[in-house]
Amino acid sequence: MEKINCNVIQDILPLYIDDVVSDDTKELVEEHLQNCEICQRVYHETKADLENDMKLSAQTKESRNGANDLKNFSKFLKKRKIKTILVSIAATVICFVAVFTFMNKHITYINYKDAGITIVEDNEDEVAYKTNIRGNYHWNTSLDTETGVGTIHFEQSLWEKYVDSIFYPFDHIHSSLKKDEIKEMYVDKDGTTTTIWEAPEEEQKAYLSEEHTEPLG
């Protein structure tokens, strides 16, 4: 058989090492390597180079996978952090709404002695009095224009008592115009009434002698 040129053998060595040549070509290469020291040396060098290339490729792939894993983990943490923040905000809002609703639904009727009503001004036009109720509160009033007797009572929610107390002073001023009424009474929850103020008898007679259909001021 005619001897095969070394250049031909060396050109197909990478294919031979990767085992992608036909059986006939494989046999020719192996026969040539047995009798050619130069090609044997080139074979070992080529094989070593290919193995190194494979190692570098594997390391690069592993590094790339590691970087991708780290990047994906960072994205996961970021999404989880955002989700946690949103859940926390939602939970806080729900808790606030629940507490606000609960505290505003529980209303306490304030009795006269607990209101701490004190007259602070009494002149010919009006009567002003203050309370000593802690926090904010609300009230209900009524006026009988025929008798000139007005009634009032105070109520307070838990929110008004414990939260609004941060923003409101303890004393609140109420005023009544004498041209509109001649007597104001506080009504307790059990129906007991207590006079807050009452006009002198002459003013009462003057009021009752006139016709009153609605408050004038």
Image: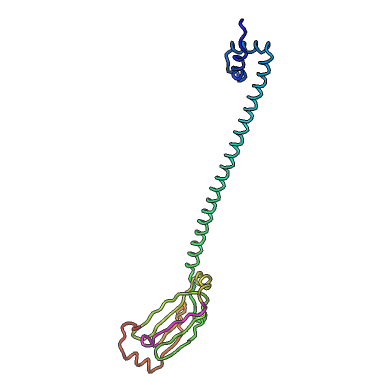
Rendered-image quadrant of the C terminus: bottom left
Across and down, in percent, residue 120 comes to: 48, 87
Quarter of the rendering containing residue 63: top right
Q: Nearer the viewer, residue 4 or 129?
A: 4
**Residue at horizontal 62 percent and vertical 13 percent from the top:** 6
Where residue 176 appears, as percent x and y from the top left, is: 41, 84
In this view, the residue in front, 13 or 194, is: 13
Please identify the dominant SS of the magenta region.
loop
From this view, report whether residue 91 is shown above or below residue 73. below
**Number of on-image labels:** 0
Residue at 67% of width from left, 12% of height from top?
A: 36
Question: What x and y, as percent, mark residue 15?
Answer: 59, 19
- Give the magenta range: 169-182
Q: Where is residue 107 in the image (x, y as percent from the top left)?
A: 48, 71
Give residue 44's quadrant in the image: top right
Q: Is residue 64 magenta?
A: no
Queried whether the magenta region covers residue 174, the answer comes back as yes
Colour mapping used in the image:
rainbow
